[in-house]
């Protein structure tokens, strides 16, 4: 098979057994790879209702046909699991070099179940995997762990590990890959680091030398020639500033969350903008394997209390979560906070939004000093930094924060729900659910919950897109979700795919797939793969109890209009959301409760799912 | 009446670029089309008399803006009528937006009532990615 090695590695940490399975071309054409493989394996092998932090939960590391080929941006590795934050299907991705090395080990997917009796790491190689003791690594930070394992194993080895937060089962713990040659990667969202921690799995290392062969190298060259210019133009700002370039833009249009979304215009935004950060701290560009964009930057803090901190640039989402949402304009503290989150292994978005929620609850008297042990105030970055560590080790207030904002709210009474910014248990990112109507319906229906990687904001920021009206947004969300599902199955970086290949499915995508695999898929075929993956993800969630009532937006988004700025007055009231949901379900061929119908499932070749959804 | 119009180009490799032009308006009420025409005429005139280095650029294509940013050479105007027409067409195609006192203006024929302190912004967002 061109583009594939056709192998899946299954690992059971409880009994230490490993097993290599094979898959055929039909399986590959049905699910492509990445999240497609992950959801198929999880749906099939995970009994409904199991606890995310139990040994029965499964992690799936998956790559795709374009991984380790000349296709730029196919550098993401996908980790699928049942999330300890949402209790639903989740996939989180990371860049760097790991995905290419996993492919060289000869496995498109690696599944990991069970719980090791002691801390271990997994070394995956072409012949399978070795489970190795990691008792000496337990407690170490992520970067130190990655370096230690790489040095111990020698040769070309790529490593992804958890930090203390994952070990301590912080529900939004992440996993970090250090690619020393250039850009690190963080599988940030959904708490998969806690799933690793619950399995006593400190790290996964991969090594191998297998080459991926492609069917039509000349067709790939022609495709790359065609996408070169649009990618160059579309990523020019990104190349220079990384995602931080969004701070001033999104603030200008009045869509940057401030003080836990109390407003969406930040009069101090320029102090934490990409332009300001770059001028102050830029050290060098970094890039994922074979990516021409180089959106990563390394920073060196040269002033103030955190001078000497050298770490990767905080992304736009991090500046939102640990900056404007906390009314924090201290640049050095944001870089430091980013470093601590990476080293402890915690998602900056969930952490920052949970902190912002706690700060507002404290302001409103819902969270008092007898529980917090200290005063909480927006703008107090010293407290933020201390709480990051306390959360990673579950000390004091950190033990409450480690559960995420939704579980914290449950302890504070119903009034606290008004200040949550989360969907299906996942804290939301920095693309306004009030200002971008496509995100309103997109977040409500996202299989991950409050994620901007199921429905994308990118096209909604264009000035020719009317973000203010719900008209056409259910259609937009459906089409865009098929695009993200296919992109995730191809393990593509969003930036390269959106700006190079196109932000919606188009002829470039079957060209890409066919040139790698030698197949002859049409655009319609590719769209159908995206729809199949999306429906199977939904089916997984429906099996776990998700219905229309969970496809809902935070109180503040539905009831509190944006108080100032260019989009003053905008929100998404329940009637509007319901109308969009009706249209969305109808377009999808789902029931009014949001359940895929037997006819829809049959039409997508998912007949085996019929009858399992209640 | 004197009115300052601010142009902001977002997404350039050189970062956010802000420029201003001061207009003298004979009337306080005019259509968006007229506002665009007056703004562009003023900029062209200032370019031709070397009072400004180049067009502020909201109606230029991303390729033109990136080329100019890359070469450090500003884009100089053609004939006034051509530039005005291009700017009006680009607005109709929503290639940039006009924001008056924090309110986005969508229709070319909308009438605007302006005063000296009215905040008028022409905003161009180059292609970007959503985080």
Image (cartoon, coloured by chain):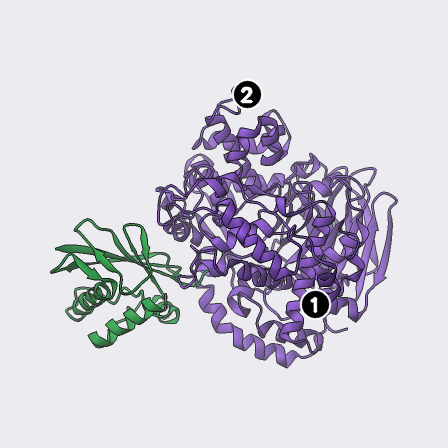
| Chain of the residue under label 1 | A
> Mark number for residue A373?
2
Q: Is residue A279 above or below residue A366?
A: below
Q: Viewed as shown, does residue A438 lie left or right of A120?
A: left
Name which residue lies at 36% across and 69% down. Answer: B93
Chain ID for green: B
Chain that is coloured purple in the picture: A
Kindly indicate whether the residues beneath marks 1 and 2 are on one polypeptide chain: yes
In the foreground, A574 or A390: A574
The image position of residue A131, as x and y in percent, is 82, 47
- Chain hosting mark 2: A
Residue pictured at 75% horizontal, 67% vertical: A28
Q: In which quarter of the image is the N terminus of chain A?
A: bottom right
Residue found at the very far bottom of the displayed protein: A218
Marks 1 and 2 sit apart, C-alpha to C-alpha, by: 52 Å
Specify few, some or many for label 2: CA neighbours under 10 Å numbering under 14, 14-19, or 20 or more. few
- Residue at disc 2, secondary structure: loop
Whether A454 is drawn above or below A419: the answer is below
Q: What is the number of the mark on residue A65? A: 1
């Amino acid at each position: 098979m061109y583009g594939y090695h056709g192998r899946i590695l299954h690992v059971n940490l409880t009994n230490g057994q490993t097993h290599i399975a094979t898959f055929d071309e039909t399986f590959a054409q049905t699910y492509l790879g990445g999240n497609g493989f992950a959801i198929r394996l999880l749906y099939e092998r995970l009994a409904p209702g199991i606890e995310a932090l139990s040994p029965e939960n499964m992690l799936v590391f998956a790559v795709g046909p374009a991984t380790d080929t000349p296709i730029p941006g196919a550098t993401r590795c996908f980790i699928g699991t049942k999330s300890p934050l949402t209790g639903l299907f989740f996939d989180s991705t990371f860049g760097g070099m790991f995905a290419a090395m996993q492919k060289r080990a000869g496995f498109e997917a690696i599944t990991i179940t069970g719980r090791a009796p002691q801390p271990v790491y997994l070394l995956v190689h072409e012949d399978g995997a070795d489970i190795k003791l990691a008792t000496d690594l337990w407690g170490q930070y992520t970067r130190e762990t990655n370096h230690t394992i790489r040095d111990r194993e020698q040769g070309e080895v790529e490593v992804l590990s958890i930090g203390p937060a994952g070990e301590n089962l912080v529900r939004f713990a992440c996993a970090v890959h250090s690619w020393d040659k250039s850009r690190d990667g963080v599988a940030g969202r959904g708490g998969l680091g806690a799933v690793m921690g619950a399995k006593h799995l400190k790290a996964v290392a991969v090594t191998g030398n297998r080459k991926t062969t492609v069917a039509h190298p000349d067709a790939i060259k022609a495709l790359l020639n065609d996408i070169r210019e649009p990618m160059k133009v579309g990523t020019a700002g990104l190349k220079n500033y990384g995602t931080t370039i969004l701070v001033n833009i999104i603030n200008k249009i009045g869509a940057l969350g401030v003080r836990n979304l109390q407003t969406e215009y930040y009069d101090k935004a320029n102090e934490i903008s990409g332009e300001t950060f770059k001028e102050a701290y830029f050290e060098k560009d970094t890039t994922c394997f074979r990516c021409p964009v180089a959106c990563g930057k390394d920073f060196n803090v040269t002033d103030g209390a955190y001078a000497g901190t050298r770490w990767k640039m905080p992304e736009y989402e991090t500046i939102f979560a640990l900056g404007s949402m906390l009314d924090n304009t201290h640049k050095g503290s944001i870089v430091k906070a980013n470093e601590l989150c990476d080293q402890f292994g915690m998602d900056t978005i969930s952490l920052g939004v949970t902190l912002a929620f706690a700060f507002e609850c404290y302001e409103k008297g819902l969270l008092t000093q007898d529980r917090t042990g200290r005063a909480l105030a927006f703008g107090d970055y010293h407290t933020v930094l201390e709480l990051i560590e306390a959360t990673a080790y579950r000390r004091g207030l950190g033990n409450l924060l480690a559960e995420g904002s939704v579980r914290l709210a449950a302890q504070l009474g119903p009034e606290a729900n008004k200040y949550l910014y989360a969907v299906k248990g996942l804290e939301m990112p920095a693309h306004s659910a009030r200002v971008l109507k496509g995100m309103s319906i997109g977040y409500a229906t996202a299989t991950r919950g409050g994620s901007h990687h199921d429905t994308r904001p990118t096209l909604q920021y264009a000035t020719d897109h009317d973000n203010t009206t719900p008209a056409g947004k259910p259609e937009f969300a459906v089409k865009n979700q098929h695009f993200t599902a296919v992109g995730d199955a191809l393990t593509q970086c969003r930036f390269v795919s959106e700006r190079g290949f196109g932000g919606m499915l188009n002829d470039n995508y079957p060209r890409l797939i066919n040139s790698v695999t030698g197949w002859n898929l049409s655009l319609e075929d590719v769209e159908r793969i995206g729809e199949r993956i999306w429906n199977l993800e939904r089916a997984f969630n429906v099996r776990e109890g998700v219905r229309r009532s969970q496809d809902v937006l935070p109180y503040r988004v539905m009831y509190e209009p944006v108080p100032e700025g260019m989009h003053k007055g905008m929100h998404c009231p329940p009637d509007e959301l319901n109308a969009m949901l009706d249209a969305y379900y109808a377009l999808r061929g789902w029931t009014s409760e949001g359940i895929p119908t037997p006819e829809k499932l049959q039409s997508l070749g998912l007949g085996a799912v019929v009858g399992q959804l209640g | 009446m004197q009115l300052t119009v601010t142009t902001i180009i977002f997404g350039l490799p050189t970062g956010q670029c802000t420029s201003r032009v001061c207009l003298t308006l004979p009337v306080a009420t005019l259509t968006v089309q007229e506002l665009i025409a007056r703004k562009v005429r003023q900029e062209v005139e200032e370019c031709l008399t070397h009072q400004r280095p180049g067009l502020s650029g909201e109606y230029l294509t991303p390729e033109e803006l990136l080329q100019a940013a890359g070469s450090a050479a500003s884009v100089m105007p053609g004939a006034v009528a051509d530039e005005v027409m291009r700017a009006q067409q680009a607005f109709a195609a929503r290639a940039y937006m006009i924001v008056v006192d924090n309110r986005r203006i969508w229709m070319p024929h909308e009438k605007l009532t302006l005063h000296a302190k009215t905040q008028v912004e022409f905003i161009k967002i180059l292609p970007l990615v959503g985080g």
